[in-house]
Image (cartoon, rainbow, N blue to C red):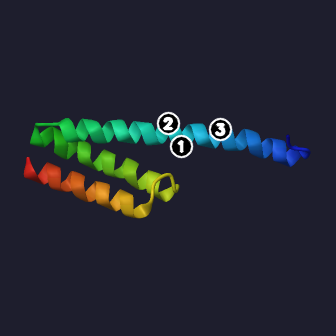
Amino acid sequence: MANHKSALKRIRRDEAVRLRNRYQHKTTRNAIKKLRSEEDKKAAETLLPSVVSMIDRLAKRNIIHTNKASNLKSKLSQKVAAL
């Protein structure tokens, strides 16, 4: 167990950050699944910018790797364009 006040605070903060990251990551994954299952081109085109924004946010906060974010955005853009 931690001996310093700052270490105890860090433990509390790390847990809060972990839960926030987990929530954002799961929410983004659900949005990606929803976009992939979309059959209507208009609906997919309106959904794409918000999903791309969520992916960029995850990459900016190092929740996912930058290259993974780029690959996801590329694949989703291709899928929407092919509809």
Quadrant assignment for the N terminus: top right
Q: Which residue is mark 2?
A: 23
Res 82 label: none
Where 35 sits versus 72, above or below?
above
Q: Which mark is residue 16?
A: 3
State which quadrant residue 41 falls in: top left
Whether residues under marks 1 and 3 lie with C-beta atoms below 8 angstroms apart, the answer is no
Where residue 34 sits, quadrant-wise, is top left
What secondary structure is found at the residue carrying circle 1?
helix
Which residue extends farthest front?
A: 1
**Amino acid, disc 1:** Asn
Q: Write down the residue under mark 1.
A: 21
Asked if the residue under mark 2 is in contact with the one under mark 1, i.e. CB atoms within 8 Å, the reply is yes
Residue 48 in the image: state x and y as whole percent.
Answer: 25, 47
Q: CA distance from mark 1 to mark 2?
A: 5 Å
Residue found 16% across the figure and 56% down from its top: 78
In the rendered image, the vertical position of residue 30 relative to residue 51, given as above or below? above
What is the C-alpha distance between the residues marked 2 and 3?
Answer: 11 Å
Q: Position of residue 46 (x, y in %)?
A: 21, 43
* N-terminal-most mark, 1 or 3: 3
Query: Which residue appears farthest toward the bottom when viewing the image?
Result: 67
The Cα–Cα distance between marks 1 and 3, rounded to whole angstroms, is 9 Å
**Can you tell which quarter of the image residue 28 is in?**
top left
Q: Earlier in the sequence, mark 2 or mark 3?
A: 3
Please name the amino acid that badge 2 sits on.
Answer: Tyr
Considering the numbered disc 3 on the image, is that residue within a helix, a strand or a loop?
helix
